[in-house]
Image (cartoon, rainbow, N blue to C red):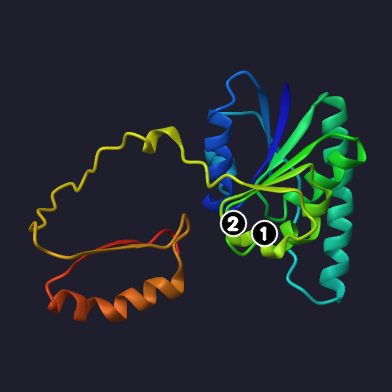
Amino acid sequence: MKLLIAASGTGGHLFPAIATAEQLPDYQIEWLGVPDRLETELVPPLFPLHTVQLGGFQGGMGLGALRLFFQLFKATFQVRTLLKQGQFQGVLTTGGYIAAPAILAARSLGLPALLHESNALPGKVTRWLSPWCSLVALGFEAATTYLPKAKSIVVGTPVRSQFLNATPDLGDLTIPAEAPVIVVVGGSQGAVVVNQLVRAAAPAWLAAGAWVIHQTGAS
């Protein structure tokens, strides 16, 4: 089976998609993303990457919304052409704005579209287009509340094989066995607000004898 995976932008969208692709060795997989995003670094060593120009929906009905509408129309046409010429048999997406042209193009050709939503609070595109999908796989049962018209199933969030038998590596850190350890994870890009909060709280944590391991990310 030939499958197009549409996942873009952040690790939250990309890594569950990569983890799923790892479990489909008999599938011929190609990828759909956006130029200059994280997928342009992660995907090419693994799968052929196709890109379309598309921005996120920020709300409002001004010129920005009109520009986005034309971008979406153009991207949907491009993806439809890709699916047809490439003789793909289905689409898998993990949400985000790249999911919109992928789902619309697939359904216009009568192809199945499967969406995986890792978040307990689904994103805008997931909420809008989930009824168009053949099936919506959810990371959390709580998400079903926001997707009443979707055909959904709770499956959890896929984890890449490299983490299934991971060995903890603390490098040169020698943490006392009795010391409390606070691990802060801000996602693949980090999170500015979380970083600022940790910076403000760290002196009190350290004074209390805690160790702090903070994944800051690029942000």
Q: In the figure, is residue 18 to the left or right of 8? A: left
Q: Which mark is residue 141?
A: 2
The disc at residue 74 is none
Residue at point 20%, 79% (across, down) = 203
Q: Is residue 119 left or right of residue 152?
A: left
Is residue 155 at least partly visible in the picture? Answer: yes
Q: Residues within 10 Å of mark 2 (few under 14, many from 20)?
A: some
> Distance between the Cα atoms at labels 2 and 1?
6 Å
Position of 135 compared to 111: left or right?
left
- Residue found at x 60% / y 62%: 142
Which mark is on residue 144? 1
Q: Residues within 10 Å of mark 1 (few under 14, many from 20)?
A: many
Q: Which residue sits furthest top?
A: 26
Q: Nearer the viewer, residue 136 or 2?
A: 136
**To which quarter of the image does residue 178 belong?**
bottom left
Residue at the (52%, 36%) spot, across then down: 19
Label pair 2/1, CB-CB below 8 angstroms? yes
Residue type of the residue flagged with mark 1: Thr
- Residue drawn at x 42%, y 62% as measured from the top left: 186
Which element type, helix, strand or loop, lies under badge 2? helix
Residue 8 location in percent, x, y? 63, 48
Q: Position of residue 105 (x, y in %)?
A: 86, 42
Q: Secondary structure at mark 1?
A: helix
Residue 205, image x, y percentages = 20, 76
Q: Amino acid at mark 2?
A: Glu
